[in-house]
Image: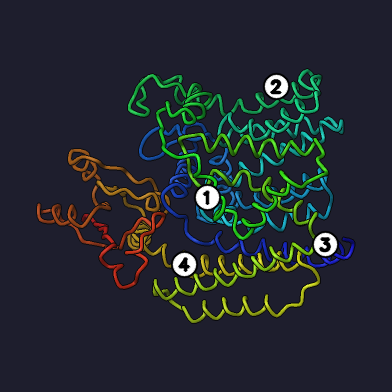
Amino acid sequence: MHDVERALQRYFPWLVIIGIALNVPGLWLEIIEPDGALYATIAKHMVQHNDWINLWGDGHDWLDKPHFPFWMAAISYKLFGITGFAYKFPAFLFWLLGLYYTFLTARDLFNVTVARISVLISAVALHSTLANFDVRAEPYLTTCIIAAVWHMLCVYQKKSGIHIVAAAFFAACAIMTKGIFVLLTIGGGWVLFWVFTSQWREFLNYRWWAMLILCFVFITPELYSLYAQFDLHPEKVVFGKTGVSGLKFFFWDSQFGRFFNTGPIKGSGNVTFFMHTTLWAFLPWSVGLVSAIIYLIRFDTNRMPLRWIIYGSTLLTFILFSLSRFQLPHYIVILFPYFSIITGYFLYQKAGHIKLSILAKVQQVLVFLVAIAVIGLLYWTGLKNEWLATGLTCFIVAVVNIIRFENPLQRILYNGYAMAAIIYIFLFLFFYPFLLQYQSGRSAARAIWANNPELPVAAYKSFSYSLEFYAPADVRLVRTSQDLDAFLAKKPCYIYTSPELADSLLNAGMKADILAAPEYFRITKLKGKFLNKDTRSSAVEKRSLLYVR
């Protein structure tokens, strides 16, 4: 075991650097529609109108999510300007902080070696890296949860009182990111730990009550903003109704309403959704995670009760997600620090065991399968520079198979990083740049900037979040011909619409030029007909940008 630890200590810094570097290219890619561009536009509205209280999106008062991620993006806009990089950068910083707190939590519950393995796993987990590119709430939420858990561990160990404040602060930030239900992921494991060990006095411990009180003090900016935007204005139409309470939605409808499917935002799902989602979302470590869970249930003899603060929270949150009718793949990302620690502990325990070689061979096979899939996709889609991408993929496969490994753990980690490198180089350097060409709103915004960025812009019955974000100023959402007539009083102007509506307006005598005719496809819902280079033209739609003289 000591040889394994010494070897890990030697290559750990280099793999961490590689893992972080693989996450960086996504920062410079354009924001992807729909959610990322919508959230970026909401933060843009904050800055342009100097309004940090009212959330405005989709052309109306917006209640779906709390304020914290938008405040972070808006602050970044103030520092760096309103750009895609500025929107993603604070989320990336939170993700880095999350790696640090993952290390601290694993170190204090297990040991330094488990902590190092956990960080290496977390750094390149697939959906975590995708969340750094397609930024929504997850990078903020994931870090705030694991940070709150570690500071609570310090509170439990009776360390400095500053940890009570820090735990409350991070828990409050998590609540202001997703809602009150995150307290289950933060504190559920603690409750199970106290119950299993009969520590009933902990439920009366003043430290926890002080933390809860401080937590609710820290969320008062969110509560005030909701009250000011909605509760003080019952005349506003929200979710098709008037008299909607922002505070009630925050504490009930957005959380319990979604779980019981009784709120204004409904979903559908099945109990197996997050099981199969985890298998691809946690690549390249999915097989290791499944093995770790089996190991913990059947073979682990060192069952330190305190570790239930992560085991319990993982179990409760996963069950809650699975029973909920509102299911989306990115929800599972908040459990990735827990998954990483659980997998890291398993790999540490089995580091000197011959059976770990079986998992190493599985990882090696997965590298080949991913490489074949990437090369096949390159040629099926007809991407540019496919020879370069193929060469890089083959080079990574060759290097990881030439290296001499000192132990199975090193082989597993190196193969995992080789798989991650193949996937992320393909996605960020070749695949996503190709897909983003079909965000027609971004192409239209470029044409506006090149022609005259001072003129007003309207989207007429063809809405684009990327147009709203990348356009110079606000984009007026026009849904009726009467609203269009009112907007045209401001001409000259721009109108973004469908080719059919553009033709009808021109045939009706509108004096306008077609400034751009970008192609459109909803790239977050890929289909074979679009990916196939031979049938793509029949799957792609057109949009028109009119310059009204």
Task: Tell me the amino acid under the disc marked 1.
Answer: Thr
Q: According to the image, label 4 marks what residue?
A: 431
Q: According to the image, label 3 marks what residue?
A: 352
Task: Tell me the amino acid under the disc marked 3.
Answer: Gly
Task: Tell me the amino acid under the disc marked 2.
Answer: Ile
Q: According to the image, label 1 marks what residue?
A: 277
Q: Secondary structure at mark 3?
A: loop
Q: Which mark is residue 33?
A: none
Furthest residue toward right: 2
Quadrant containing the C terminus is bottom left
Q: Secondary structure at mark 4?
A: helix
Sequence-wise, the earlier of marks 3 and 2 is 2
Sequence-wise, the earlier of marks 3 and 1 is 1
Which numbered disc, 2 or 1, marks the residue closer to the eye?
Answer: 1
Which numbered disc, 4 or 1, marks the residue closer to the eye?
Answer: 1
Sequence-wise, the earlier of marks 4 and 1 is 1
Whole-number angstrom distance, CA of label 4 to CA of label 3: 39 Å
Q: According to the image, label 2 marks what residue?
A: 213
Whole-number angstrom distance, CA of label 2 to CA of label 1: 36 Å
Whole-number angstrom distance, CA of label 2 to CA of label 4: 48 Å
